[in-house]
Amino acid sequence: MHNSPELVEKNPALSFKPFSEEYLADPYRVFSLIREAKPVFYDEEIGYWVVSRYADVRECFRDQERFSAAITLDQLKPLAPEALQVLVDSGVVPGSALVNEDPPTHAQRRKRLMVAFTPQRIRATEPRIREFVRGYIDRIVARGSADLVRDLVWDVPALVAFHFTGIPEDEVELCKGFATSYALFNWGYPSQEEQLRLSRKLADYWRYATMHIERLSRNLGDDFISEMIRGHLEDGELFDRNYLVWMMMNFTFAGHETTTAASANMFRALLENRAQWEALVADPSLIPNAVEECLRYSSSVVAWRRTTKVPVEIDGEAIPAGANLLILNGSANHDANEFAQPETLDIRRSNANRNLSFGFGAHLCMGAPVARLEMRIMLEELTARLPHLQLVQPQDFRFSANTSFRGPSSVLVEWDASRNPEPAQAA
Ligand code: HEM
């Protein structure tokens, strides 16, 4: 049960339980209560100020003078000494990775790294992505049922991200495993025992990233990590060796976990709103805006973090310097002051692209065009090849217990294979 706005106003933490099953299943109901009753409040349990309205969230992303990104990759729950010792013993050297950097270093590094993300380079990946997607759909079309997470959106974003990082295809499963642990380690609330287990996983991920940098250094390609290694060879201070390892870990994670979850959310949302799915089947030109609307309606990143560099006032709340902020971009995306009828999925919404799912400002997600491309292709191919796809009813959607990354662990679907408009292996 959710509490009323009056009760929430007295004690917002009553409804904000970010690791509870109820919240994980539907944070949007809680977001709307908070936005109305107490849009900014301090949550004692996690030690963060929670910011929920669109204008405030956007400002926290935008203003680098008052808000620092340095906390972005820290463990939300401080690390137990034993877990820290595992990292020290494994030789893990702490470091930053673009997303948690402030000016001026952030801008200098980002500018150099953008070389690997030109629109031409991204466009050039389209045939490859389509081939991956069609290949995965070929494997399921005759079956009549599938789990869209396991059978499509788990692998495709990983293969694409790995194309950008130069990771061989047969290491997909290994890296996917690292990523799952990484999300729980940094953005979850693990017990001390779990922290120990996750620290060991992080150390494995670290060793793997170090090995990958070394093997790629011997044989540079045209991928993002090779570009970074070139940056290191040009200017060893701007990109030192340790930086390459952290970037490798974070980039791999950022590149697929988020897109897997965003695609799973998208298919679920469209199939639950059948008329919207049918509209896309009838008119595929609506697909790019539908992707944007799905990113708004059900973001795969619902919360991000900043710290205050100076004392600030947000929505009348005085927040001291050095405070931790949990900024709810998922909530901002449902703010009625920005989006009319925010709880309705509307693939024709004219301002859907003002969603804050990719952040905003200097740190705006570098991979956003890649993620949009992947989601568009998956939607184009699935609406064309399985237009009669339906969600299995009823089904439970389950979510990982962390503050930020949100996508169901499975999306079960079924269809009548005898009505398929196109057979398997038609590519
Ligand atoms: C739907 C999928 C995705 C979502 C929702 C997402 C979301 C985000 C968010 C919220 C940020 C932080 C913005 C900020 O701090 O202001 C970010 C940063 C970043 N993302 Fe993504 N991301 C996605 C996909 C990707 C992909 C596919 C890649 C790479 C191919 C990628 C690479 C990055 C990088 C490198 C940054 C750091 C940028 C910087 O700090 O300058 N992301 N992303």
Image (cartoon, rainbow, N blue to C red):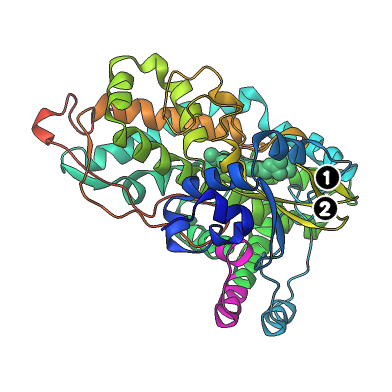
Lower position in the chain sequence, tag 2 or tag 1: 1
Q: Name, please, the residue furthest toward the bottom.
A: 82
Q: Mark 1 Cα within 10 Å, few/some/many (few <14, many 20+)? A: few
**In the displayed structure image, the side of residue 400 where residue 360 appears, left or right:** right
Residue 387, image x and y in percent? 23, 27
**Amino acid at circle 2:** Ile
Q: Is residue 193 magenta?
A: yes
Q: Quadrant of residue 276?
A: top left
- Tell me: residue 190, above or below residue 421: below
Residue hosting label 1: 313
Q: Is residue 164 magenta?
A: no
- Please report the bounds of the magenta region as a residue range: 184-201
Q: Quadrant of ligand 1?
A: top right
What secondary structure predominates along the stretch shown in magenta? helix
Residue 152, image x and y in percent? 35, 44
**In the displayed structure image, the side of residue 402 where residue 360 appears, left or right:** right
**In the displayed structure image, the side of residue 417 where residue 134 appears, left or right:** right
Q: Are marks 2 and 1 in contact (CB under 8 Å)?
A: yes
